[in-house]
Every structure is written in C-alpha cells, then in structure tokens.
Amino acid sequence: MVQFNAIVDLLKKLVSTPSFSREEEKTAQLIADFLEGYGVLVSRHGNNVWAVSKFFDESKPTILLNSHHDTVKPNPAYTRDPFNAEVIDDKLFGLGSNDAGGPLVSLIATFLHFYNQENLSFNLILAATAEEEISGKGGIESIWNSLPKIDFAIVGEPTLCQMAVAEKGLLVLDCVAKGKAGHAAREEGENAIYKALWDIEWFRSFRFPKVSPTLGEVKMSVTVIHAGEQHNVVPAECTFTVDIRVTDAYTLEEVLEIIQQHVSCEVVPRSLRLRPSGIPVDHILIRAAEKLGITQYGSPTTSDQALIPVPSVKIGPGDSARSHSADEFIFVDEIKAGIETYIEVLNQCSTLLPVSGFQLPVTGSR
C-alpha cells in the first residue's frame, strides 16, 4: 500500500511542474512514473494516463476513477510563487493543489489501495486526464473508446467530500441580429442593435418551465455583445454571445429548439458536447453515499462529467471556492479525508453489488 507521505510528495511534484491545458506532458510522465513504481501497467495517449485493475475480470462491473492534471494559468492576484509547493500550517499551497491535484492524488492512492486485491467485486480503471479546464477534445473524450467498458464513474473534483449527483451542462450560443445599414442622421436603415435588444430581453426574462430537483432552473446570461464601427452609421449587424447552464431537466437539443422558437436572430451553438449529467436515485453510488451519510447536492459548475457517457458522481477533497483563486491551497488533512472517503464509498459499493452480474437501474432518474 502506498504511504500517505508519498502521495503528498507526488502532489508537491505535480504542483511544481507547470501543466497548463495542452501542455501537460511533464505531469503525465510524473503520474506514469509514480504508478509504474508500484508495479502498475500504465497506458498513455497524448497527455492522458490510465491503468486497469491488476485482476481485471470482464464479468464484473467496472468503475472509472477520473480526475485531471491540467491547470488554468495563475491569475495576477497571486502573492506567492504558484509553482512553489510549500506546506504551511497544514496548507499545501500552489497552482492546481486544490483543483484538481488533491482529488487526483487521492484517487491514485485509492486505486493503489485496491490494486493488488484479487477478489474484488468490481474492476477499477484510473484515468488521469488532460485538457479538462478547457473542455478540450484531447482529454477524457480522446481515450474513451480505448478503455474497457465502464459501468459508472467517480470524478475527482474539490467538493469538500460532498457528492455532486448532478451537474449543469454548458451551451454557448453565438447570435446574430441582422438589420440594414443607413445614415444615422436620416430615417434610413434598420438598426440591428434594436432588433438584438428584443432577443436579449427574452434571454434575460425567459424561464424554462421544467425545474430540476437537484440543479434548479436553466440559467441564461448574455455575456458578449458587439455592433457598429462608426457613430453616424446605423449598424446592419449586431452579434452577441449567450452562456447557458443547462440542467438535467432538458437536453441541449431541447433547449436550443425552445430558443429558436422564440428569438428572431440567427442562433449557432458552438458545441453540443458539454451535456448536463445526472444519476438515478437508486444507483449504487447514491445508495453508498446514503449509507455513509455523505451530503448530496447539484453542482452548477462543469467538469469532465459532461463528457462521460455513463452514470457518474463528482466528489473529492478541497473546496470548489478555492479553484482558480490566487494563492490556491488544499489542507493536507483534506487529502487524507479524501482517500478515506473514496475507499469507504468503494467498499460500500462492494457490499451492495450482486455476487454475479450487474445491471444499471433504469428508474427514478434525477
């Protein structure tokens, strides 16, 4: 079994090694080397690293343990060296220590805890993936078809070890309101800004009728707008961007269809990849959380859950409020609690799994 000090040292090395999205080569190698040091057979594609249970058995259900090792760039408010992984008063400081280094190394420790156990009732796959912070196509999505069939997943993110049982998806729309150019001093043209205002007001005030019990309402925000080049010319075009956080009450396609029925501007979605996620109320992960007294909630933020096409939950040490903040840190004790929580959840899953065969519940979807 891996020693806790070794896990903390791994996190320090990861923090000390820059790993911005699409630039994670060195941290991928650190993770691969660490796992191989414990006799684990490692696979790698791009900057994604994964490993499979030593005693993998196709007749057993397979659980994915996934977290990411890329980071955002440090914001200008940092007062410390973001790559100086230093522990002060139980706080391990550094970029990516909380999001998602702490959850990642906790999942690595958990995987190693079970790795040499021969008679488990499940298989484990550990995947340390890239490009999560930019929802890039070179991350979990790029290796999914290379993995064995997965039944459900635990995604490591800082949640104070509470369990996010649903997560909002993301739909970004590029909208264009078209008018007709004309001189501003005369009664000419058709002002595209005025046309856009009607649609922008609809985005501001419309409420989708279905409300998710875990995630609440769909939220739409107009975040970017541009029109015109000269003060004396009525603009023929006004473009604006809408950020939409979609709950598990709707598919992205349903939201898009409703919008297109109500606005007059052209609407083009940037992507339909980042889908909302939920999990059946009687799923084994939910039952395990209930037995352990783990708080459940709906998450407004988006993670790799959006790209994982099987039931999943998001849980891990650290606090989402610290993510992307200046002087990011995680408490060392939080990492220890994270490892314990992951192991307890998997042990509970083991007691709840049938002796042979496995079937996902199909009723009571959140």
Image (cartoon, rainbow, N blue to C red):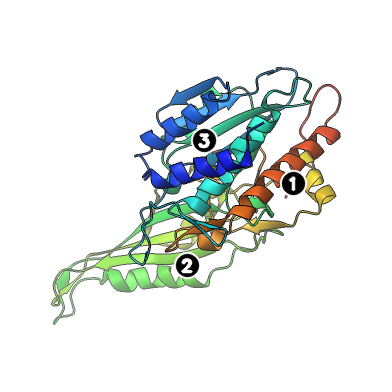
User: Does 200 appear above or below 72?
Assistant: below
User: Does 320 appear above or below 157?
Assistant: below
Mark 2 crowdedness (10 Å alpha carbons): few <14, some 14-19, many ≥20: some
Tag of residue 357? none
Q: Nearer the viewer, residue 264 or 2?
A: 2
Residue under label 1 = 365
Q: Amino acid at mark 2?
A: Phe
Q: Earlier in the sequence, mark 2 or mark 3?
A: 3
Mark 3 crowdedness (10 Å alpha carbons): few <14, some 14-19, many ≥20: many
Nearer the viewer's eye, disc 1 or disc 2?
A: 1
At x 18%, y 79%, the residue is 187
Q: CA distance from mark 1 to mark 2?
A: 28 Å
Residue 353, percent from left and from top: 83, 31
Could you tell me which secondary element the residue under label 2 belongs to? Answer: helix
Q: Amino acid at mark 1?
A: Ser
Could you tell me which secondary element the residue under label 1 belongs to? Answer: loop
